[in-house]
Image (tube, grey):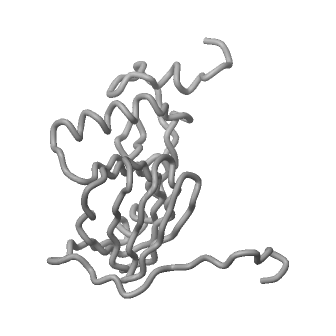
């Protein structure tokens, strides 16, 4: 096996590994998760389940645990036409908009986003999303740590949260001015 993409060569088959191979305890031995495979799985899940949002978690191919033991890496595909169910959970998440555009409502405040934008949802904040066009959001959360400590909770709210404001980013402020 040559030195190029060694982790993909060794750990490419889901549920398969060489006899005697071991995995690092703290992280996945697979160093790259290909977009084509992620997109194929998102499409298949949407075809099977439908809905406004489909979510995946990137996992260690040997153990099924999170790719890094202390945080979860997730991909959420949001389809246009409706807001997702409003949820809240312990722990925070950092979202990066991979494709598409839309809005998220976080504790009643609407945040518009597009490709390359980053936004954060704090612990126990009410959160829902709405896409203008099909959108893919990558998220990192501290859920695994809270689960191990038995502190993780998540709930779906009975009705959509009320929008009480819209976030307006500051224009023309440089980092040196803050």
Q: Which residue is at a point 37% across and 79% down the rendered structure image?
A: 125
Q: In which quadrant of the rendered view does residue 5 lie?
A: top right
The residue nearer to you, when weighing 107 against 25, is 107
Which quarter of the rendering shows the C terminus? bottom right
Q: In this picture, is 95 found above or below 59?
A: below
For this view, does 120 lie left or right of residue 157? right
Q: In which quadrant of the rendered view does residue 92 lie?
A: bottom left
The residue nearer to you, when weighing 146 against 176, is 176
Q: In this picture, is 110 found above or below 36?
A: below
Residue 122 drawn at (x, y percent) = 45, 77
Residue 42 drawn at (x, y percent) = 32, 39
Q: In which quadrant of the rendered view does residue 12 lie?
A: top left
Residue 62 drawn at (x, y percent) = 39, 34
Residue 97 drawn at (x, y percent) = 50, 54
The residue nearer to you, when weighing 45 against 117, is 117
Which quarter of the rendering shows the N terminus? top right
Q: Which residue is at a point 42% across and 48% down the rendered structure image?
A: 136
Number of numbered callouts drawn = 0
């Amino acid at each position: 096996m040559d030195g190029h993409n060694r982790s993909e060569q060794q750990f490419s088959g889901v549920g398969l590994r060489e006899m005697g191979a071991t995995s690092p305890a703290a992280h996945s031995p697979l160093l790259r998760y290909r977009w084509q495979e992620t997109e194929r799985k998102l499409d298949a899940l949407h075809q099977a389940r439908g809905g406004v949002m489909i979510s995946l978690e990137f996992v260690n191919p040997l153990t099924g645990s999170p790719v890094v033991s202390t945080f979860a890496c997730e991909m959420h595909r949001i389809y246009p036409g409706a807001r997702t169910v409003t949820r809240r959970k312990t722990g925070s998440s950092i979202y990066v908009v991979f494709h598409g555009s839309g809005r998220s409502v976080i504790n009643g405040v609407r945040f518009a986003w597009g490709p390359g934008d980053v936004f954060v949802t704090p612990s126990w904040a009410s959160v829902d999303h709405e896409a203008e066009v099909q959108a893919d959001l990558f998220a990192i959360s501290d859920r695994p740590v809270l689960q191990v400590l038995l502190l993780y909770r998540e709930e779906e709210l009975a009705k959509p949260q009320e929008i009480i404001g819209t976030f307006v980013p500051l224009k023309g402020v440089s980092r040196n001015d803050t």
